Every structure is written in C-alpha cells, then in structure tokens.
Image (cartoon, coloured by chain):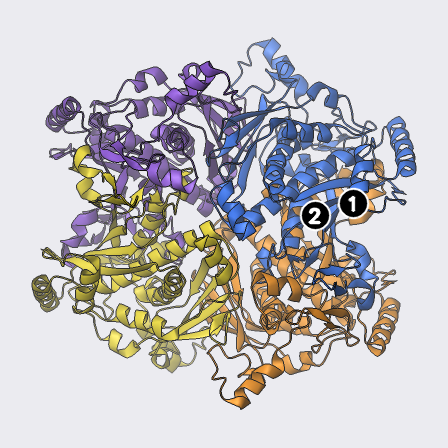
Chain colours: A orange, B blue, C yellow, D purple
Amino acid sequence: MEQKFRYLTAGESHGLKLTAIIEGLPSGLKIDRNFINNELRKRQSGYGRGARMKIETDTVEIISGVRLGKTIGGPVCIEIRNKDWENWKIPMSVDEIDFSNRELLKLVAEKSFTTVRPGHADYAGSIKYNLEDLRDVLERSSARQTAIEVAVGAIAKLLLKEFYITGFSHVIQIADVKAEILPPNYTLIKEAADHSELRCADDIATDLMKEKIDKAKVEGNTVGGKFEVIYGNLPVGLGSYVHPDRKLDGKLAQAVMSIPAIKAVEIGRGVEAAILKGSEMHDQIYITKEKRVYRKTNNAGGIEGGMTNGEPIVIKGTMKPIPTLRTPLNTIDIRKKEEASAHFERSDACAVPACAIVAEARVACVLAEEMLQKYGGDSLEEMKAHYER
Amino acid sequence: MEQKFRYLTAGESHGLKLTAIIEGLPSGLKIDRNFINNELRKRQSGYGRGARMKIETDTVEIISGVRLGKTIGGPVCIEIRNKDWENWKIPMSVDEIDFSNRELLKLVAEKSFTTVRPGHADYAGSIKYNLEDLRDVLERSSARQTAIEVAVGAIAKLLLKEFYITGFSHVIQIADVKAEILPPNYTLIKEAADHSELRCADDIATDLMKEKIDKAKVEGNTVGGKFEVIYGNLPVGLGSYVHPDRKLDGKLAQAVMSIPAIKAVEIGRGVEAAILKGSEMHDQIYITKEKRVYRKTNNAGGIEGGMTNGEPIVIKGTMKPIPTLRTPLNTIDIRKKEEASAHFERSDACAVPACAIVAEARVACVLAEEMLQKYGGDSLEEMKAHYER
Amino acid sequence: MEQKFRYLTAGESHGLKLTAIIEGLPSGLKIDRNFINNELRKRQSGYGRGARMKIETDTVEIISGVRLGKTIGGPVCIEIRNKDWENWKIPMSVDEIDFSNRELLKLVAEKSFTTVRPGHADYAGSIKYNLEDLRDVLERSSARQTAIEVAVGAIAKLLLKEFYITGFSHVIQIADVKAEILPPNYTLIKEAADHSELRCADDIATDLMKEKIDKAKVEGNTVGGKFEVIYGNLPVGLGSYVHPDRKLDGKLAQAVMSIPAIKAVEIGRGVEAAILKGSEMHDQIYITKEKRVYRKTNNAGGIEGGMTNGEPIVIKGTMKPIPTLRTPLNTIDIRKKEEASAHFERSDACAVPACAIVAEARVACVLAEEMLQKYGGDSLEEMKAHYER
Amino acid sequence: MEQKFRYLTAGESHGLKLTAIIEGLPSGLKIDRNFINNELRKRQSGYGRGARMKIETDTVEIISGVRLGKTIGGPVCIEIRNKDWENWKIPMSVDEIDFSNRELLKLVAEKSFTTVRPGHADYAGSIKYNLEDLRDVLERSSARQTAIEVAVGAIAKLLLKEFYITGFSHVIQIADVKAEILPPNYTLIKEAADHSELRCADDIATDLMKEKIDKAKVEGNTVGGKFEVIYGNLPVGLGSYVHPDRKLDGKLAQAVMSIPAIKAVEIGRGVEAAILKGSEMHDQIYITKEKRVYRKTNNAGGIEGGMTNGEPIVIKGTMKPIPTLRTPLNTIDIRKKEEASAHFERSDACAVPACAIVAEARVACVLAEEMLQKYGGDSLEEMKAHYER
C-alpha cells in the first residue's frame, strides 16, 4: 500500500454495504458527491449488463473526513449500500445462525454452493481460506467490490482535477470486433465514447459489438474485449527510474492487472512494440521557436524511463470473458470431490465498458499518489503552491 | 516494497560496482555462488549483444548475511564490480573534481552530453532531478542495474528451489518472427531454449530471428520482441482476491512492467483473451479416480482470482526495441533548447533474451515474497515444516 | 503500516460514527461481539471521567468480513455510532451548509472556536492543515478515535487468544500516588485491577488516587499517571534484531507513544535501568532438571535483542494530565493573532485507566502482526498447524 | 520502512564491512564525507569504551548515488570497513570451510560459543533462527551495526542542514549521577557537551560519572545512563494526528527504542508528566506585538498532537548497562542444555555517550523522512522552493 494516498476497502457482494477508508488526502479538497455518483453510474451502464445493475443504482454516502463540503485532513470514509440486502439478511448474517431453526437453515443452504466456477477465485480461494461453502469466496471475490473502488478513484480524480489532470476511457475491442475509425483527437474520442452504449468511439464498431454480445447471450456465453485509459496534462517526472518499485509503468500495470478478469496490460503501443524497429518506435522530440517541446507520435504512451514525459499516458487493458456462464463448464464439487457442473450466479454477458471505468479509477489512484509524493503539502492550498512554483 | 523479502539496489552503470541488500531471508538457506554467477552469465548472453557484454563477465561477491555457506538471518549484501571502472574513475568520481585542472575537466566533459535520447529516461529524468549533464541520468537509468537484480532474483530462486519451485523463460518473438513450433512440454521447451543463441525453443525461428537482428545492425537499427516466463510446482493460493493490492497477477505485472523497455505484460492467453468466448477461455476442471484435480488447458496462466490455482504460471512480456540507435533520432539539446541528434552510447541491437532472464528474476522475487507471507518461518527448517504440514 | 495486520480508522469525535477496516486476518476466526463490547466498556469506565462517557456506552457493529460468526478472509469492517450525533448534525454536516440561512449559520458558529488549546493538536494542526475553525482539528485529534482502536485491538486479542496469549493492564500511578503494595502474581494483579475504579491493584493507593482526582476537579485541573501493560505466553522470537525497523521494542514504543497524551514508554525496568549495574539488571538464566528454562527476574520486560524471550512482556506508559482545563490556560486566538483564554470543551479530570485499555489494544495489534509474520497461514487452522508444529 | 527516506543496512560485527543503501534522497545534495566521518568519530569516543574503539577509527566510503560531490537522485550506497577483518577471515568466511582441514576447523571453533549471554539477543536469536553457534547471532545483533546507522543519519543531517535544522545530544545521567547544573541555553549545552569526555554538559557531574565508570570497570561490571537529543528550527506540523501511525512522537519512540540497550524513551518532560498537574504541564502560548508566537516553557518537548509545534523537540533515552560483563552471569549452554557462565566478548564498561550519537542519527532519519513527506520535491532545489514558499 502506498504511503500517502492509501486506502482499504471492505464489503461483500450481498452484504449490508461496501466501505472504504482513504487516508492521505490534503485538507481543503471539495468533495462533490454528484461527481462520485456519476462515476458509479458510468460503471453500472453498458450494453450487455445483466439484471443486477438495475437493482443497484449505486450512490455514495460520505461518512467522515469531510466537513461542510471539504476534506479536513483526516481519513475519509465512504459507503455504498447494497440495495438487495433485505433478501440476503439471513444467508449473509454476520452473526451465528441458530441452525436448529429449519427455516433459517434453509435460507442459508439455498445460497450455499460447492461446485467451483472455472475462471473464478472459487477453487484456489476455498483451499487458501479453508472455506467449504463457496459463497464465502464468491462474496468477496465478486466484481461487486469494484463499485467502492470507483468511488475511491472518483475522489482521486477530484484531487487530480485541481491540477487540471483529467482522463477518460474508451472500449477499443469486443470479442474480435475492433474500433477502427476513431475521431481525430482525445476530446472527440471521449465525447463519442460517452455517447456509445459500449463506451466505444466508433459507431459502426459499436453496432457490430452489440451483435456479438447478443449472440453470446443467446448461446449462454460471454465475451471479453479491450479498452484504453488516457490521462492528460500530467507534469513531467511522475514515477522514477532510480529503483524498480518506483517505476510508474509498473505501478500502473499493477493497478490495472489486479482488476478482476484483466489478463493483459499495455502501455502505449504495447504488444505492437515487439514488431516495430527502434527508428519507428521511439517518439522523436522537437521544439518550437517559442521553446515548447513537442512530439509528433506517442508510441511510448506518455512514459519513458518509468516516468511521465509530458505526453498523455495511454494504458490498454484486456478483459477476459466473464467466467459465469449460463451454459455451465465442467468442474468439480469441492466437498464431494467429484465432477460437476459449475454453479451459475446471475451474470452479465459483457462487462468491458464497466471494466474500463474501474481502470480509470485505479489509474487515478496511482496518479494521485504520485502527485502527493512529488508536491507534498498537507492542505490543497499548500500542495498547489508547491505545484505552481 | 514488500514486507518480508525486501531489497534495495544501488550503483551506476560505470561506477565502481553495483550493490544490493536483501532483507527477510530465512536463516539456514545455502547460498550457491555458482548458481548466481550462472544466472548472471545467462543475462549477458544472447545473439545481438554489443561489445560491453564481453567486457563485463559479471560475478557476484557475497559480502554479508552469509556465514560458512548459509544465511544466518541478517540482511544479505551482494556486489557486482563494473569491470570497466578504471576507465571511468574520473568522470564518475563520487568526489568533487578540481575543475581548474584542465585534464580532469576534459575527462569529465568527454562523458557529458546534453542531447536527450528519445525512448530513454533522459528527458523526463533531467527535468525531474534538475540535472543538466545527462550522464547523471543515464548512469542510473541504464539497464546495467538489471545485473544486480538478476543476482537478487537468483537468491530468490535458491529459496524457491527448496520448495521444488522452478522456472525458466524463453523468447517467443523477435520483431515479426514468432516461435511457432514448440516442443510438447515445458521441460523440452526449457532445454531447447537453453541451447538457442536467442533463448528460443523453435530452431527455425531462431535462424530467422538472427537474420532480423543482423539486418537491424546493418541499418544501425534495433529490434524488440516477446518472451514468456513460466514457473511450476507452486502451491495453490499464493496471492489473494481479498484486496486489490494483494492480487498476484497485479504484483507480477508490476514486477515485469518495471523492467526497462517493457511495454506489455500478459498473463496466460493475455491479449488473446479478448477474442475468446467464455466457453473457450476458462479452464474446465476434472478429477481423476485418485482424486487428483487437473485441467486440460491453462489459458488462465495459472492464476484465477489473483491467486495461483495449481497450474504453472505463465507471464508474457513485450520488449520494445532498444532506444539507443547508431542512426540517431531527432531530439533536443536540453541545455541549448534547440533541436539536435540524440547522443549515442555503445548499445545492443537486440536484448530480448537478456530481458527474459531479468523477468525470471523479478518473478522469482515476487514468488519468494508470497511463499514467505504464506508460510512464515524464521529459519528454512521452520518454513519447510510449515510448508510440509 | 504493517503488511499483514493492517488497518485504517476514520471518524470524527461528533460525526455520525467511527469506522475501521482491518485487512489481513485469517479466515475461520470467531468474532465475539460481546468480547469487543466489553473492551469498549472498560475504556469508558474509570473514576474521574466526565459526563460524555455516560452518553456514549459504545457498542460495535460488525459490517463485513464476517459471516455466520466467523471471518471469511476478507477485510473486516466495524463501526461505532456516536450517540450524540443528533445534536451535531448541522455543525458536523459533511455537506455544504447554506449560510444564508441564519439558523444554520448559528448552529455551526456555536461550535466553532479559534483559541488554540495548549497541549492539544490545535495550534500545529491549524497551521498544518490550513484550518481556521479549530473544530476541524479537534474533531479528528480528539481521544474519541481511541474507541475504534480499542475495538480493533479487541479483534487482535481474539486472534491472540487462539494461541493462549492474553494480556491486561493496570494503573501504577496517578499524580504522585504510586501503587506500592501489589498482589504477588499477574493473575492476582489483574483480578485486583479489574475490581478497582481506577484499574489499580493497590486498594489503599486507589483511595489516595481518587482523592487526588477529586481535588483536581475542584481546582478545575487535571492529573496524569502511569500504567503497565503485560502480555504473557508469547512464543520466543517475535520481533528481530536483524534490522532496526524489525525490533519488537521499537514497534511497541511506537504503538504506545502514539496514543494521545503519552509522553514516555518504558520496557521492563525502563528508566530505572539507568541506575542498575550490569550485574543487577540482566536476568540470569536457569534450567530445571526437566530442561525447562527459567529466570528469577524479568527486568528486561520480556524483550532481549528486540525479541520476545519467553518471559511476559511489560510495557509502561506515562500519560500527561489531560490538556483541557476548566480553568483555562493562556493562549492565542489563531484568527485574531492576539492572546486569549483557551477554549474549553467537556473533559475528564483523569483518563489514565482508559488510556491503559487503549495501550492494551495497541499492543495486541503489534503482537497479532508479529504472530502473523512468524506463522503465516491464511486460515486459522493453517496458522495453528504452523504454530503447533 | 518509510516510503521516501528508506534504507537497508547489512554487515556483521567482524565481517568484511558494513553497507547501507539509502533510497529517496533528492538530487543535488552535497555529500560532505568529512562531516560523516566526524559523526563516526563521535560515536567511537566517550570515556569507558573498551579497546575495540581504537582498532576501528571508522571512515565511510561512498560507493554510488553521488557524482562529483552531489547526489544524482539514485540510491546512495555507503560502506564502513571493519579494520579487524584480517583476523576474522576464516571464522567469518561467507564460503563453506573444508572442516577436514583441522587448522581451519580450529580457527572457526575458537570463535564459536554456546553459552547465551543474558541481556543479549543470544537466547531468543538462537531459537528464532535455529542457530546453534551463537557467533551467528552475536555478529548481527552486535551494536557494531550502529556504526553504519550513524553514517546514514549523518546523511539525513546533511539534508536537514539545508533547511537550517540541526540537533545535538548530551548525556544527563550515568548510573545514579545526574547532570544537574546545565548551561542556560542549548547552544552552550552543546558546546559544553562537545568538550566533555562523556558528552555531559555538567563538569562536576562528568567527574563523578567517570568515577562510577572506573569503579564498575574494577568490579568487572557495567553502568547505564540517560541522554537527551534535541533538534531545533523545525517547521510546525511535521507528523500528524490524523492516524495513529502518522504521529511523530510514535515514530521517534520507535527510532530510539530500537537502538540496542534502550529501555525507555521520553518526550519532553517524559515520566515527570505523570506528576505534574494540567496547569503545570501544558506550555501556555503568547504572542509578541510583532505577532511572533512563543512559549515560556517546553514541557511538551516540541510535540503536541503528534506534530512539531515549533519549539525544539526533546527526546530522552535510557540505556541499560551493557550486558557483556567481565564477571559473568549465570546462564545456560544452549547445546548442552545445562547451566553455565555467560560467554565474555571484549566490551565497554559504559557506552551512553556513543548511544546518544546513535540516537541523534536515528532521529535525523525520522525528521528527514517527515521533511520529504511534507515538502516533496525530487531535487534539493525543488524541495527548497516548496519549503520557502
């Protein structure tokens, strides 16, 4: 965990609520609840989501660390209630249940399962934590926990915005359909993505992608894809080359790879860098008469030597198809030690747009940390004074 | 930095030596100097390396933390001398130089440069650290520091070997040439890779790759590529899904992405996961009559829910072409603020096989940390007793 | 923050509630809510407490990380509601207040103050965080936050109890009255302390201490004192001498010194060690015929070389008198920049017994961390198997 | 380990050398080798030291991270050679020894011992790390490792000096002799202490202390004592009250308590705070016409609410008598499991002045970290600009 912008989250998928505590924010930062809720809404939208998204409509509650609209230096606690809690009160009870009461027992047993779902945490989780009821694994390993992370990231974004640093994400591939015709600049890409049901800036690709999703749904199948996160207006020199664990690209890779279902992270040209020659890959540097340094390409994705180089940072993530299939996979029953069909729990056919929003949030947390490291400061005023120096 | 297996490295590319201190090893671990030196030799080999590799022939010196061949619980200090130091004593002097002595001044000035090399840390580094002589940036940002990291990783490997955990790497692509016909199992792939000048297990591909490298050299150009790191025999449940910063895939991504020149990290099928359907991607689970759990595929690369699942872990890295080109790129002079040709410093045409060895070492450090976290223990004996339980 | 047993707390003194998230507990640990509430009750009792203690009667709510009475591996979130919240809703609102509404403005203004209280965080806090309304400093710097820490410590104690490690605290001095006649062993001291209104095992001293407190109250003054925390049945070798930041005495000192109002921490004989000769100080070692190692003294307080040595650990803390005096001190108004009388906020005359309970909790957290470090394990079963080996 | 000013040290008492790597220093900091050596010399002086101090005369070598006299942003590696190494080459060999060679065997055996020394790390260390030859414990647990820590602290002091922050230490008690008549201000106390063989600013006390030490020597005994570390000119607001692990007093307590042989740490009035009434303890605040804030007392020792309050910080440490006695204590033989006399290794009769210097160094590291946290900055120029804002 980072030293300055550090946080812990807690909460189960069907528990009472999700909680996060963020420690290290400067005082004097305005916390705009609507902004956070809007980020939550973005995470919940996207073509191909299942029924749960409608139940939830997440909203954040700010519990502490904020007074009269602004941070006061102390840890910030936020919560998101699970709307479905009433139906899960018994099986998700934190207290022991009287199992001689058959009705209670039944309610718990209905939610228990012992057939591990391939592609999920179930198998390794049940062994690691010595848990026989896979409900105990599912509840925390669920992507539901990304809701509170998006809220944490939204607060990081509020800090970054004070320094005019903003970012966005867009979907560039669903299954084998790629976004190919993109608007000519980031402002327009963002705008187009915001208007797409799949957060994809290529209209024609969006339609093809929706077809893919529909087809997968019919088959009881799921699809994955790729997205891109872009942040601009960063100062030169966030991160460092002086020690391996201070490299910004490494930190970004950790932040994005640890999102559930992500199997690849790329910076700039990413895997294509293998094919390019040195003379093609590296972004040559120019200077205007007014002594403004610029580049004509950004193959590096804004990072050289593990540091921001002044160009926008560009990170791609690849999401695997969601592993909860209506047509279940072969697997084993962890209790009976015999083959079985995987447990099915309500699921989406495609969650790439949501995943892109989570990645935006994660990247924001890394960048907020780096800004705090470089500029220090205990209040926003002091941090800004350091920055503007 | 991790809590248990933590280390710091120091040293410049042309300084007296590289140093590392590793804290957190159990006592009683046999430190085999030959094993470490062999890892260092592997890092230095590979078709396409420049002249420096011959100068170096790195060997490790063990300074402390080891007595009569075994660790004693205290921090382990290791060093690698830079063979070329005699020629760099003056320009790399840690002490102030009397610049009224023109001869000394000349020796320093000869090694100074102010034209930033695109793709390197030079530009951002000089701004970040307020350094005008780019020699000050180059010396620490150089890939030379990976030598000591390979030695650190070798010690991590010695710990892993006590638990029968071993790994290897092989090159799967140079420029646009991919390894296509691979031996049928990891043992044979490792063997074939060990016999290839490019650490590539496909003989025919090796030859084509060498041609690519030769061609790049003639052009004064460089090429990149891809490699794969595989570790087997891991216990189920290293890493965790319970908090984002405990995911093993995230830690591996950080470890590999922060190697100089890496632009993409993939776990298992990686970017291909975008294209596969759920039913194709997820590794179904089977069980033998003897109750041994197995899978027929390993698309997940050994990691589900951010944890090892018992299958070998598979990580791919993409290396960009080395940014030091004999045919230099357009850039700026950081002092004069005008356009210029990039500084050229002795360089390789291709370093993908070396990079694969560095990645092996980095992954070993992550796994050693996870083993120490899971099994605890202050002596190797205690750790083994916990493991064998 | 430690790697394994890590936690963050949040919450203001008069906010809605206090929250903590604890990450790193093994699964399978029974969470006994009554035990936690009993610890909270102990923190609230003690002769000399003000009116607030009666308002509060803290009880913990367990929000997540626990299912059907046991931990499931994920982060544990707990909360304590502030009973007085209804009266503070407006001045402690997290949202902006419409200050054109004079009634709201008045409610906020009534709770604002600008005269810094010597001995509190007010002066430095207002400068550090650029806060003019000292309410913003008081709310987080208040000792109220120790309530949630006691709950966190109670959970650490539940883990320790699984390994038969238990501890307690007793007051050994209030003002200049020292506990002098103590029962002959720790079991009896604990028992006597539990029955004393001041957690003091010397009855006569208790009476004299109460007189001191009464006298201070009448004067509008406050008194401090000393307490001792003792934990027994620890395995040999928690902590380490191999690196300064791994010394157990250092970690304990941090844990206790960072409790509000603590000005000294002693291990074993503490400051008396200055006077003793080497031959008097060091605890000679003996062995029985049955090969049981023992000592006749415990001047070291159970720690040698920064490690537990098998004897009970003994830590003393000195608490300064509470700095909120009814007869206020000279100070300055931070806004007007002129001299003034310090703000008075409801306060206790003596809080040493409560402080001892907080110290017990803090020490429990350090020991839980060390146990997790040494024995590893993801479930309580695994951890126990490692321990019992 | 802290995030910004982090370091690791390595080395055994009779090994080849001690090494430290410091990561996180800004670039552009002038490293004055003479200043570091002078600190090392201060650690080695003091009435009552044994013969070893004369053998050593430690000097630092700067290996990396510094070029032409200044830091360049990368990790700084420093070393101190052990002068006595030639005599210990065989018993402290890092390589395995051919024990069929009886001469080699004898050299090793001569330095082995199995009778644990009470008060040292021997007993717990041998159990923890499963080491039978207590030489393996002694070598790292020896106070010799404080030499390199003094060098690390000297570098921290060089950073602090750039912000006009300076500190010193003086001895205030040896055995039962206390310094009573002290010069009227810190400048004069420092001056007097620098001229005392015992770093004690009270001449008469110095003489009495020397008598105590002489007497202990004659008896084959040892004495402890107390010292005080003072740092001035600190900005208001280092440390924080917002989370327990950010309290400056806690960090200082850890830094000082983890020095070998320290049994108590006090801030400001320390243990005397128990006796003072609230009205006596708290440092009232005044303001001049020129709006300069001041206090007439500094009972808090410069820290309120876990933060610097602008007054000098004052930390007291209590050192127990050195546990290596010429007249040995009763103990056990760890191999034979029977009672025995403790092993005697060359030792001092009193090391309180040296310990005070180590404490100065440790405190400097904590303060350097806090300065880096508050002001950020990658180069000294940037850090200063932030500070001066």
The amino acid pointed to by label 2 is Gly
Q: Secondary structure at mark 2?
A: strand
Q: Which residue is mark 2?
A: B232
Q: Residue D91: which quarter of the image?
A: top left
Residue A106 visible in this rendered orientation of the protein: yes
Query: Left or right: D274 with respect to D140?
Result: left
The furthest residue to the front: C289
Query: Left or right: A370 with respect to C183?
Result: right
Query: Left or right: B176 with respect to D265?
Result: right
The amino acid pointed to by label 1 is Tyr
Chain at tag 2: B
The percent coordinates of residue D307 (x first, y second) are: 34, 51
Q: Residue A357: which quarter of the image?
A: bottom right
The percent coordinates of residue D1 (x first, y second) are: 46, 44
| Residue at 78 percent of width and 45 percent of height | B186
Residue D73 visible in this rendered orientation of the protein: no
The percent coordinates of residue C96 (x first, y second) are: 47, 73
| Residue at 40 percent of width and 16 percent of height | D84
Answer few, some or many: residues within 10 Å of disc 2's Cα (few below 14, many 20 plus, some between 14 and 19).
some
Q: Nearer the viewer, residue C99 or A295?
A: A295
Q: Is residue C194 above or below residue C172?
A: below
Q: Which residue is mark 1?
A: B186
Chain at tag 1: B
